[in-house]
Amino acid sequence: MNTRQQMGCGARSRRVGTFQRSSRGRAAFTLVEVMVTAMITLVVVGALMSAYMYGMRMFEVVKPKLATSDQARHTISKMVQEVRSAGSIQIGTGGETRFTAASPNTKQQGNAIQIFPNVETTNQFIRYFRDEGDDTLRRITNLDAESAVMARDVTNAIPFTSEDFAGNVHTNRQSNRVIGLLLQFSSLPYTTGKAGPGTLYDNYQLRTRITRR
């Protein structure tokens, strides 16, 4: 091999070595690239967390509305069926172990309604009443040992009325009366206490009128 060939081989070796070193240099990450990648990752993760927290807040806002709507549908459907098939009905004041019908010549309204499936006997009854101790609407029959909760967070003290066709409350017991039901709910999605001054809550109202068949 002559001197010129040896010089050519040396030049090729130097070029190959330079190429290899350059390839290794391009394969590595610089500090700036690592920082940019980290920032992009933080931005994406932050956006995902913000979307998740927003979804949770919206769920907490909608949840009490759905619960109230479900309670109302369940209560109304059951009460409508029992009132329409009742033998007789009384409205007054009562609780789990007592009931007093509204007196004649007074407004036929109260926190409780007692439904008698058979007009000939008072031993069988269905009673709905609002418990002011825990703001619940409850139901109990003569066969039950304790009442069952039908709706929660009921704030109005007088949910039951006996009305005429125009919506006026009777002052005497009428056989062809219309049973009025008014349920006002308070929902506290962000607190555990009762509604009061300085407390944020949502109000819902349900009103219906039921006639006997």
Image (spheres, grey):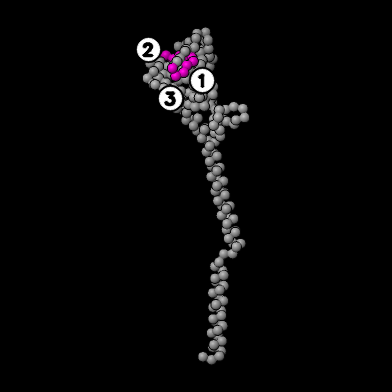
Asked if the magenta segment contains residue 88, the reply would be yes
Q: Which residue is under mark 1? A: 159
Q: Position of residue 139 (x, y in %)?
A: 44, 22
Q: Residue 181 carries which label?
A: none
Asked if the magenta segment contains residue 99, the reply would be no
**Residue positioned 43% across, 22% down in the render:** 147
Based on the displayed image, in which of its 4 quarters is residue 3 positioned?
Answer: bottom right
In the image: residue 143, left or right of residue 94: left
Mark 1 vs mark 3: in front: 3
Q: Is residue 85 visible?
A: no
The amino acid marked with disc number 1 is Pro
Mark 3 vs mark 2: in front: 3
Q: Which residue is under mark 2? A: 121
The amino acid marked with disc number 3 is Ala
**Residue positioned 53% across, 41% down in the render:** 56
Using the numbered discs, state the Cα–Cα distance from disc 1 to disc 3 in whole angstroms. Answer: 17 Å
Dot 1 or dot 3: first in sequence order is 3
Using the numbered discs, state the Cα–Cα distance from disc 1 to disc 2 in whole angstroms. Answer: 26 Å
Q: Is residue 153 above or below residue 158?
A: below
Q: Where is residue 153 in the image (x, y as percent from the top left)?
A: 52, 27
Instruction: Tell me, yes or no, whether the two marked residues, 3 and 2, touch with CB atoms within 8 Å.
Output: no
In the image: residue 124, left or right of residue 64: left
Q: Which residue is under mark 3? A: 148
The amino acid marked with disc number 2 is Thr
| Numbered disc total | 3
Tell me where the magenta segment starts and ends, as one range.
84-97
Are there few (<14), some (14-19), or many (20+) residues within 10 Å of tag 2?
Answer: few
Are there few (<14), some (14-19), or many (20+) residues within 10 Å of tag 1?
Answer: many
Based on the displayed image, in which of its 4 quarters is residue 78 positioned?
Answer: top left
Name the residue nearer the viewer: 86 or 97. Answer: 97
Which residue appears farthest toward the right when viewing the image?
198
Are there few (<14), some (14-19), or many (20+) residues within 10 Å of tag 3?
Answer: some
